[in-house]
Image (cartoon, rainbow, N blue to C red):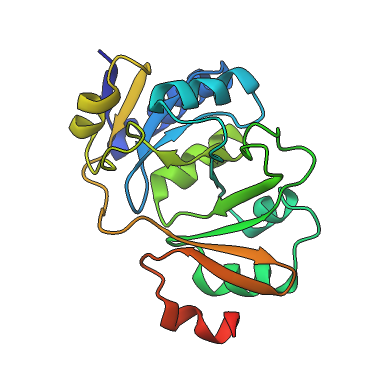
């Protein structure tokens, strides 16, 4: 059984301190974002990255998206980001848009699924942003569920799928759910939609034309 910790304003400082201590020790913590619950780990710790794959039962050739808490943090994780990256980020972040770009050399190849590319997202979630800021680094942001199973909207759903595989689940109520984030891959000043989601093709049309 995983520990399920209720999150409220009165105990937020303790929750952040406790969670970050686990993350910096190479552990994985589940928490809600603005879409679904995610598995948060230190992407620069290879043991922690391996643990995320183990928890999900995910193939190592599948990249892990990273969550950031600022555009500056995101740009540091990319290799020569194109102008289109900044245009899309400034328009749709924070929010449910993942941008796939060439990864900077600081990101372990395992995080990119050996592709050399990384998906970055700035979630519209106060708790997720607070965790990232407290950890002073991006966090992995893959959904907190078994591979090929439905994404989880609640801490109880996370516990049913992966409970016992990770030490801590933060229960801050139901995540928004709906659709997973829209994913757009950028190649220079051109982009293509890899996965449809809350940010629609019509909204992206002027940027991807």
94 or 133, which is in the foreground?
94
Quarter of the C terminus within the rendering: bottom right
Q: Position of residue 139 (x, y in %)?
A: 54, 37
Q: Position of residue 57 (x, y in %)?
A: 40, 25
**Residue at x 26% of width, y 23% of height:** 4
86 on left or right of 11: right
171 or 149, which is in the foreground?
149
202 or 138, which is in the foreground?
202
160 or 195, which is in the foreground?
195
**Residue at x 64% of width, y 59% of height:** 71
Count of labels shown? 0
Which quarter of the figure has residue 196? bottom left
Residue 59 sits above or below residue 205 on the image: above
25 on left or right of 181: right
**Residue at x 64% of width, y 75% of height:** 87
Which quarter of the figure has residue 171? top left
Residue 169 sits above or below residue 87 on the image: above
Q: Position of residue 31 (x, y in %)?
A: 36, 36
1 on left or right of 77: left
Quarter of the N terminus within the rendering: top left
């Amino acid at each position: 059984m995983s520990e399920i910790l209720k999150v409220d304003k009165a105990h937020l400082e303790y929750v952040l301190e406790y969670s970050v201590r686990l993350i910096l020790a190479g552990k994985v913590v589940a928490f809600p974002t603005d879409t679904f619950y995610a598995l948060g780990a230190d992407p620069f710790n290879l043991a922690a990255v391996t643990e995320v794959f183990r928890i999900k039962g995910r193939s190592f050739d599948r990249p892990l998206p990273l969550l950031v808490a600022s555009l500056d943090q995101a740009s540091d994780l990319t290799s020569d980001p194109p102008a289109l990256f900044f245009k899309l980020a400034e328009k749709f972040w924070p929010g449910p848009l993942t941008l796939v770009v060439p990864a900077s050399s600081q990101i372990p190849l395992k995080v990119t699924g050996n592709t050399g590319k990384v998906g970055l997202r700035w979630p519209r979630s106060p708790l997720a942003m607070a965790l990232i800021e407290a950890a002073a680094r991006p966090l992995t942001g893959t959904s907190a569920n078994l591979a090929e199973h439905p994404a989880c909207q609640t801490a109880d759903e996370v516990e049913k799928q992966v409970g016992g595989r990770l030490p801590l689940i933060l229960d801050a109520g139901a995540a928004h759910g709906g659709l997973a984030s829209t994913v757009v891959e950028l190649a220079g000043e051109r982009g293509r939609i890899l996965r449809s989601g809350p940010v629609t093709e019509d909204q992206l049309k002027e940027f991807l034309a």
